[in-house]
Amino acid sequence: MNRGTGDKRSGPMYRLTEEGKRYLENGLPEERLMAMLKVGKSLPLAEAKVENLGIALQWAKKKGWVGVEGGKIMATGAVTHSAERAALENTAAGKPLAADQIRLLLERNLITERKERGETRPAGDIKTVTPELLKTGQWKNANFAPYNVELVGEKAYPGKPHIIEYYKGRVREIFVELGFREESGPLVESGFWNFDALFQPQDHPARDMADTFYMEKPATAKLPDKKIVSGVKGAHENGAGTGSRGWRYAWNEAIARQAVLRTHTTAVSARCLARIKPPAKAFSIGTVFRNEAITYKSLPQFTQIEGIVADESVTFRNLLGYLKEFYLRMGFEKVRFRPAYFPYTEMSVEPEVYFAEKGAWLELGGSGIFRPEVTKPLGIEVPVLAWGLGLERLVMLLAGLNDIRNFYYRNDLKMLREMKLWR
Amino acid sequence: MALIGVDRSYLSRLVGRQLTDADIEQAIPMLGCPYEGKEGSKLFFEIFPNRPDLLSAEGFARALRSFFGLGNAQVLHAGKGKLTVTVDRSVAGIRPHIACAVTRGARLEADQISSLIQLQEKIDETMGRKRKKIAIGLHDLDKVEAPFTYTAVGPHQIKFVPLDLEESMTPARILAEHPKGVKYGHILEGAAIYPVILDRNRQVLSLPPIINGELTKVTEKTKNLFIDITGPQERPLHEALNIICMALAEAGCSIETVKINGRVSPDLAARSMLVDIKYANRLLGTSLSAKEFASLAQRMGLAYRNGTVAIPPYRNDIMHGMDVVEDIAIAYGYQNFVPILPAVPTAGGTLLDGRFVRLCSRLLEGSGFQQVVTMSLVNEEEAYAKMGRVPEKDACRMRNSVSSECTMFRTSLLPGVLKTFSQNKHNAYPQKIFEAGEVMVLDNQAETGATGSVKLAAGWSDGNAGYEKLAPIIDSLLANVGRGYKLVPAEHAGMINGRAARIVAGTEVGVIGEVHPAVLEKWNLEKPAAVFEINLSALLAGKRKAQGSG
C-alpha cells in the first residue's frame, strides 16, 4: 500500500466503499431500525423489518440506543444522528476526517484508503525507487517525495499461534529448562488409570456420572498387566504392602475397565510412574474433560499442566520450591500455599498466585506428594512430588479475558488477531 | 464439595474464645477449611471429603480448640448402657446393617439442633453417598420404649406418621407420595419388604433410609437421644456413628452404649499407629524434635508418645503414617515451610510428535494463517449433517453428556474450521485459519479401545478463495517436511466435484478441496471457502517408515 504525503495540497486519503455509499444514501442499519421505533414503546423482533437486522441490533445495542428483552426491542431515547453519518458525509464531500472518524469507518469497512498514487504526490519528485533508478544512477540527483511516515495504514495480521498454544509453549519451555521430560497419554482413558491407580475409591463422588464423561463407544478398556492390577486392587482393599489400611471395600475390576474421557492429566502421571526409574522428572500438557455445561466460566474441556518429580531426596519443601519457581517464571512473583484434599496425595496443596491487577489471590490447581498407595503398586519406592495445574485461568488472567468460552468454543478472529502475546 | 454454615457466636462459645476476623479469614483456612463467606451471623466453610468430623459446629470447634492451642480435646468415652437392639434376619437382603448409640442429658438449643441436623444431612450426602451407603436417624428416646427391633415389613403392613406430617401412612404410600420417599425411594427399589425400626410396642421410629417417624422427633425438649445408622456395609456406619457421638459429646451429652444382637456399639476407643519422626522429617524437609512433633500432633487432636500416635475414633481418614505427617504439616503451617529447589539431576526433553506438529504449525503461521483452537467434543449435527457427510461408524461417543453440543469426540477438524468461519462473518476478510489438534477413532486393538492422532486443518475464506490458494500451502508444507506427494482427484462429501483431491504421500494422508455451496449454506456462510486437512501422525509415521526402509 502507499503512503500519502503530508503535503496539504494532497487530496483526501479515503473514499467510500460500496457499503459506505449505500449507508450514506439509505441510512445506517441502526438508524433505519431507530426510525421504526417509538420512544417508550417496544417492538417485537419479528416485526422489525429492517434489512440487516442483526447488524442494526448489534450497533444499536453497542451504542446504547436500544435494549432487547423477551424478544422485544425498546428504544432508550430519541436518536437524531450517528457519528458515522457525519463522517460519511465528510468523506463524500472530500473533507478531512478526524482520527477517530477514520477508525470508526475503517472498522465497519465503510471507507477505504485511496490507492491512486498520483493524487497524493506532487509531480516531479521521485515516488518509487525502481531497479532502473538504481542501475542508471539517476537516484543521485533525485528528489524523493516524502511520505506521511506517521500513518500506519492498513492493519497487518501476521499468522500467529492461538494464545493458549502460545502459553503451552512457554510452559513447555519452563519445564524443559528445569530438566523435565515431556510425556503424553490417551484422551480416552480407562477408569483404571484415571481413578483406580490414583487410589480413588470406586464409589468416590468424583467418579459420579455427573462429573465424568463415560464412553458409550468404546465402553470398556483393557487393564494393564496383572501385577499392576493386583497391586492397585490390594491398595484399595487393605493397603497391601503399602503401609496403609486401604479403603477397605471389595474392589471391582469391571468398574476399572470403564472407558472415560480423562478428567485430569494425573492419569498421564500414573502411567508414567509405571514406566520410569527414579530419579525422574516428567511433565505433560494436555486436554482434560469434565461433563459440564458450556457457560462463561465452565467448559467441558480445558488444559492441565502436569508434573512429577520422583527421587529419594525430595521433600514437601521441594514441592513448594518447584511450584514457586514455575509461577515465578510465568510472571507471578507472589505465590502462597493452602491445604487441600485429593485422594491421591498427602500434604495436598493448592498453590495460589497473587494477581496484582485484581488485588486478589487466585487458586490455579492442585498438588501434593503421591500417597504410597499410588506409587508402590506402580513399582515406585521413593517420594513423588506431583501437580496438576490449570492453564486457561492463568491465561485469562494474563490476557485480561473474563469469558472462558473465548477458548475452544469461540474463535473470534478479531480478538485472536489483536491479542497481545507478550505481556 | 461440602459447605457448612455455623453461627459465629455459637462457634465462638464452643471454641471458648471470641473468633476474630483474622481467625476466620486467615487462620482457619490454614487448617484446610477454606472460608467461603457469611450470611448474617452464619459463617460458611468448605469441608474436604476426608474430614467429615468437621461437618458440625461441634466437631469444627473441637478441632479449632486444639488448633488454636486452647486446651486438649477431651478423650471420648461411652458409658455402659442397657438398651438392646435386635436385628431381624428379614433385613438381610435389603439393608442389613445398623449401628446405634444412646446419648443422655442433652439440653438442646435451636443452634445445636440445627447443627446436628446439618451434620446428619451432610454425612448422608457425602460419606453416605446420598444415603445409599449411610443413613442416619436421630430420635427422642423418651417417646418410645426399649428394646428396639430392626426388621422388615410389607409395604402395607404398618402405618405411622412420618416426620413433619400429621397423617398416618403405609411405607408403600410414603415411597410413592412423601417428598423424601420420592427422593430416596430408589435405594429400596425392587425390595418386596421395607426396613423399619420398631419399639417394643411396634411403634415406628424410622423407615430407613427414607424417613423417621414424627413420634420421635427431636425438639428443644428432648433430653435423651437414640441414634440409628443403617446401610449395606457395617464399617462405614460405625465411622459415621463415632463422628455423631463426638459432636454430641461436644454439645454436652454423655454417650451410652447399645447392644446390637449382643455386640456393643459404639466403640470410641482411640486407635494407635506407629509413626517414625525421621520419616516425617524426611518427607517434609524439616528437623522436628520429638517434643515439637508431639506438640504439633496435639494441635491436630492427635497424641504422640514414643513413636506411636493415638488417633481419635472419628478420624477414619488416617489410613497411613503419611496422613499423620500431613496433619503435622498443617499444624506447622504451610506458610512456614521455606520453598527450595532440590538438585535432582535429570535431562529435559520434548516429544517428537509434538515437535513435528509445532513445526507444521509454524509453517502455516508463516504462510499468514491464524491458529484457532476449537472444541474436541462435537455433536453429529456439526460433524456430519452440516458437513454433508454420512455419520461414521468408528466415532467415539459419550453416553452421559449434559450438553447436547458435546456428544462425540471429533474425527476431523474441518467442522471446526467452518464453524469458526461462521462465527466470524463480521470480521475482516480474507480469513486464513488453521488448527492442529487431536482426533479420535474407535480401535478395538488399542488398550483403551480408541486411537488418537493429530490432524492439521486449514481454511481460506474470502470473495475469491479457491483451490488454487491452498494447494501451494500443502505443497510447501510437505516440501518442508521432506515428503513427496500427489494430489489425486477425488470425490469428497461436502466438496465441489472436480475441485477436490486426496493428498497421497505413500498412503492417503489428507484431503483438499473447495467447500460445496450446499455446505456453505448450512453454515450460513456467504463467502466461498477452500479447506484442507492432513493427518500429521500418519505423515510422521509414513516418514519414519520411509526412512527405516531407505
Image (tube, rainbow, N blue to C red):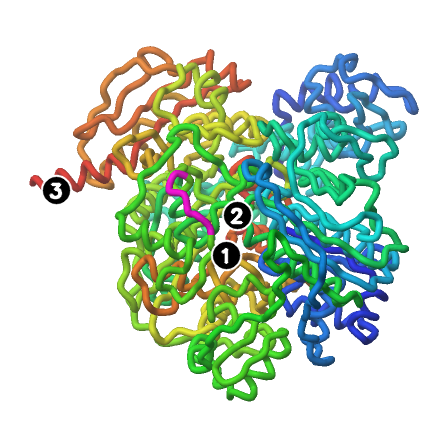
Residue B400: x and y, percent?
52, 30
Residue A356: x and y, percent?
65, 64
Q: Residues within 10 Å of mark 2 (few under 14, many from 20)?
A: some
Question: In the rendered structure, which amino acid carries the disc numbered 2?
Answer: His
Q: Residues within 10 Å of mark 3 (few under 14, many from 20)?
A: few
Please report contact status of discs 2 and 1: CB closer than 8 Å, yes or no. Answer: yes
Q: Which mark is residue A343?
A: 1
Mark 3–mark 2 distance (CA, rounded to whole Å): 49 Å
Mark 2–mark 1 distance (CA, rounded to whole Å): 9 Å
Residue beneath label 3, please?
B547
Of labels 1 and 3, the one closer to you: 1
Residue beneath label 2, please?
A204
Which stretch appears magenta? A249-254
Looking at the rendering, which quadrant does residue A245 occupy? bottom left
Q: Secondary structure at mark 1?
A: loop
- Is A253 one of the magenta-colored residues? yes
